[in-house]
Image: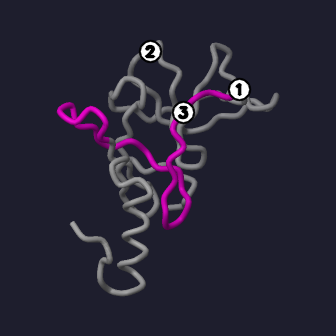
């Protein structure tokens, strides 16, 4: 499957409502250029949150424009730089978020942060983890 085509197996969650998003084709206006794009959309009909594997999360305004800056997650895969999608939350641990890369299935959590990255690099270089539990 080409890298630009979203997989039907993706199950991104809306970062605002934590609802599973659905794949749909939308008319997106970006810098005056209206084009049809495949993107995941929140199931809440009033929600303007979208996700696709090229742009990651983005928000539409009421006119379908996408070029306005909005506060959206910008989580990227550490292996290939692809925008990751929110795949899981934990209601008991309100801050927990699991992010998955649609290209390589790489996973990150917000609990790992830079500590997880640093310990992964140490383990990769030495073969042992230099971080004590």
The residue singled out by tag 1 in the image is: 68
Mark 2 or mark 3: whose residue is earlier in sequence: 2
- Find residue 56 and name its label: none
| Residue found at x 47% / y 12% | 46
| Residue found at x 53% / y 65% | 80
Q: As displayed, is residue 58 above or below residue 3?
A: above
Say which quarter of the image contains residue 71. top right
Q: Are marks 1 and 3 in contact (CB under 8 Å)?
A: no
The residue singled out by tag 2 in the image is: 45
Residue 61, x across and y down, in percent? 64, 18
Which structural element holds mark 3? loop
Residue 121, x across and y down, in percent? 43, 74
Which residue is situated farthest in the bottom direction here? 126
Judge by depth and name the residue closer to the eye, 85 or 124: 124
Q: CA distance from mark 2 to mark 1?
A: 20 Å
Q: Is residue 37 left or right of residue 52?
A: right
The residue singled out by tag 3 in the image is: 72
Q: Nearer the viewer, mark 2 or mark 1?
A: 1
Residue 28, x across and y down, in percent? 66, 29
| Residue found at x 37% / y 35% | 13
Q: Is residue 131 left or right of residue 68?
A: left
Q: Provide the residue span drawn in magenta.
A: 68-96
Does the segment drawn in magenta span residue 9? no
Q: CA distance from mark 1 to mark 3?
A: 11 Å
Does the segment drawn in magenta span residue 86? yes
Q: As displayed, is residue 6 above or below residue 63?
A: below
Say which quarter of the image contains residue 26. top right
Which residue is situated farthest in the left direction here? 92
| Residue found at x 37% / y 61% | 116
């Amino acid at each position: 499957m080409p890298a630009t085509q979203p997989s039907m197996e993706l199950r991104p969650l809306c970062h605002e409502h934590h609802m599973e998003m659905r794949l749909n084709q939308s008319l997106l206006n970006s810098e005056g250029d209206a084009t049809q794009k495949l993107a995941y959309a929140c199931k809440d009909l009033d929600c303007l949150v979208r996700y696709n594997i090229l742009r990651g999360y983005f928000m539409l305004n009421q006119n379908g424009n996408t070029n306005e800056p909005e506060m959206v997650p910008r989580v990227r895969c550490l292996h290939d730089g692809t925008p990751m999608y929110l795949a899981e939350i934990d209601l008991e641990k309100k801050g927990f978020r699991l992010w998955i890369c649609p290209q390589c299935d790489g996973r990150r959590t917000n609990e790992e942060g830079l500590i997880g990255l640093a310990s992964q690099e140490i383990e990769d270089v030495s073969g042992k983890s230099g971080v004590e539990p």
